[in-house]
Image (cartoon, helix red, strand yellow):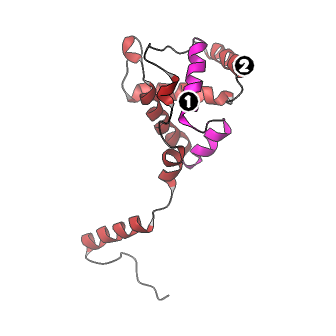
Amino acid sequence: MSERDFSSTVKAICGRDDRYDPEAYYFVREALDFTSHQLQKPAQGTGRHVSGHELLEGIRKFTLKEYGPMALTVLRSWGIARTIDFGEIVFNLVEAGVLGRTEEDSKEDFRDGYDFNKAFRDPFLPETPVQTKAVRNRRTARTGRPSDRPKTDE
């Protein structure tokens, strides 16, 4: 499908279902390509099918790669707040004839795939005191000193 045809299709979809920003559709298409490449699916033929679960994991990785700590903000600006939203977008594209599906594919494959905060916020949170202590313990074991930093009087 040409870029112009895809743009027209997204415009038509958004005309009848305005829950998601048009950018969300472009993003899902790019995430599908990313996922297919990561899974080393052939570019053509029957081996190209990506399951809902595979796509969700690919979307998670692609989102983190593309948007880093801004991932949640970007997704929410497009109207995406849960994994089922990705399923809604995918099935809007299926109904428009842009994507194919198998008999086993369902929107439900996208329900409760992962918690958005854990997937897109938590990787960027600072270390907790427990993690910091573990790092300090590893450093002590490695160097024989409690800290590589000079001690300061506080």
Q: Front-most of 133 and 5? A: 133
Q: Residue 25, how many percent across, how many down?
A: 61, 26
- The answer to whether residue 74 is magenta is yes
Quadrant of the snapshot with the N terminus: top right
Residue 108 in the image: above or below residue 131: above
Which SS does the magenta portion mostly show?
helix
| Residue name at image x 50 percent, y 87 percent | 154
Q: Which mark is residue 16?
A: 2
What is the three-letter code of the residue carrying label 2? Answer: Arg
Q: Secondary structure at mark 2?
A: helix
Numbered circles on residues, count: 2
Q: Front-most of 78 and 17? A: 17
Q: Which residue is mark 1?
A: 86
- The answer to whether residue 91 is magenta is yes
| Residue name at image x 66 percent, y 15 percent | 9
Q: Residue 61, how many percent across, how many down?
A: 46, 38
- Which quadrant would residue 150 be assigned to in this image? bottom left
Q: Which residues are magenta?
A: 69-98
